[in-house]
Image (cartoon, grey):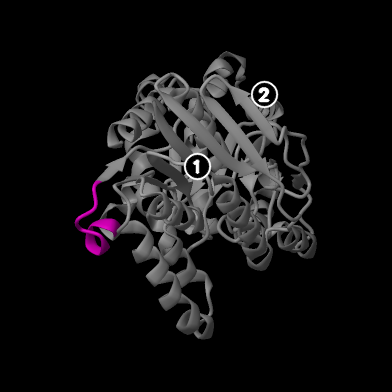
Amino acid sequence: MKNILVLSFFYPPDLSAGSFRISAFTKSISKYDNCNVDIITTLPNRYSTYSIDALENEKKDNIKITRIKIPEHKGGMRDQSLSFLEYSRQVLKLVNEKEYDLVYATSSKLMTATLGAYVAKKKKSKLYLDIRDIFVDTLEDILNPVASIFILPFIKLIEKWTFIRADKINLVSEGFKQYFKSKFPNQKLTFIPNGIDDIFLDSINDVSSKTGSVTKVLYAGNIGEGQGLHKIIPKLSILLESKKYHFKIIGDGGQKEKLITSLFDLSCSNVEVLAPVNRNDLLKEYASADILFLHLNSYKAFEKVLPSKIFEYAATGKPILAGVGGYASTFLNKYVENSAAFNPCDELDAIEKLEKLNLGIIKRDLFIAQFKRSKLMDDLVRDVVNTI
């Protein structure tokens, strides 16, 4: 019997790309009855405006889930750091007297990966990292020059210490490949992205075509600095107001107030901003929208990423308007028919690309077959178990 520790800061019913990914991972690894799996995560905390109860402890067959209560936070760097420190403290306490053959950590902001590396070193176990973002890259874009001088060298040392200890690293975006090949040339890498969850596949038949004179544009997800919605939605909505476009923004995050303030300052009347909703309600929103909108801020780091939102958007068959560059733009052009990528934060380019979209529904059967989440997670879990 193999003992596996899984570290994921987010887990359902929390709403985040990380929680949806680890949920599918858990479903796949539960099929391996020769593995005992301890999952240590947190109680729902992603958004202060979305509160839902969850059990602190769950046990089913070979899977045990422990959810740690962390301090309430509003998404700022200081609050997130304090929350992660509490998570780390509780993880180390919980695993103190346990032994594991492998530690699996899924991480976007590096620290969960570093925690996994520390536990694996302490337990003399194998380490498998699932990397969803390059934290150093992002910090280089968002930190001011003075902060960069003091913080970046330290974070780079942590990154190096973490990644050289991994027995295997999976990257969710092939856009990360060159970064890892140049900095960690001896590491074993795989590329298994996010994918389409069954809940979106089951709802395809409920999607409707455009009706009415107003074109409804929907964004659903995080409203943070990384998405940069405050830099594009107000200006874009003003330019499209006379053409009868209506924008609906569903979500929460650190830049939500800045977005609302920008909309107010420009007197935007064709945008509504709503609180996060659960996935069943989200499906209804997708079904009633005419265009699905995606945007990343104009940071160089984001040229490497592949947003998970692309997969669920594509499954609906609806047209996609995406403010992305780099690998995400290449991916959309290659795999997602009736999608249009525009330069981030460029409202004029957005309108030009918008006019090229077909406002009907198309079947993306090849895309669905290739990027079904359950299939991708089966591949990932197989690779993880074979690493032991």
Q: Position of residue 139 (x, y in %)?
A: 48, 68
Disc 2 residue type (three-letter):
Thr
Q: Position of residue 113 (x, y in %)?
A: 45, 53
Question: Which of the 4 quarters of the picture holds residue 216?
Answer: top right
Q: Residue 57: within the magenta? A: no
> Which residue matches tag 1?
98
Residue farthest along the top direction in this orientation: 205
Residue farthest along the front direction in this orientation: 97
**Residue in the picture at 61% in, 25% down:** 59
Q: Nearer the viewer, residue 325 or 203?
A: 203
Q: Residue 183: within the magenta? A: yes
Disc 1 residue type (three-letter):
Lys
Q: Is residue 341 visible?
A: yes
Q: Label 2 vs label 1: CA separation?
A: 58 Å
Q: Is residue 314 visible?
A: no
Question: Which of the 4 quarters of the picture holds residue 371?
Answer: top left
SS label for mark 1: loop
The quadrant of the picture occupied by the N terminus is top left
Q: Position of residue 324 (x, y in %)?
A: 45, 52
**Are the two marked residues, 2 and 1, in contact with CB atoms closer than 8 angstroms?**
no
The magenta segment is 180-188
Q: Is residue 180 left or right of residue 224?
A: left
Q: Is residue 243 left or right of residue 173?
A: right
**Residue in the picture at 80% in, 60% down:** 264
> Which residue matches tag 2?
211
Q: Relative to residue 313, is residue 188 depicted above or below?
A: below
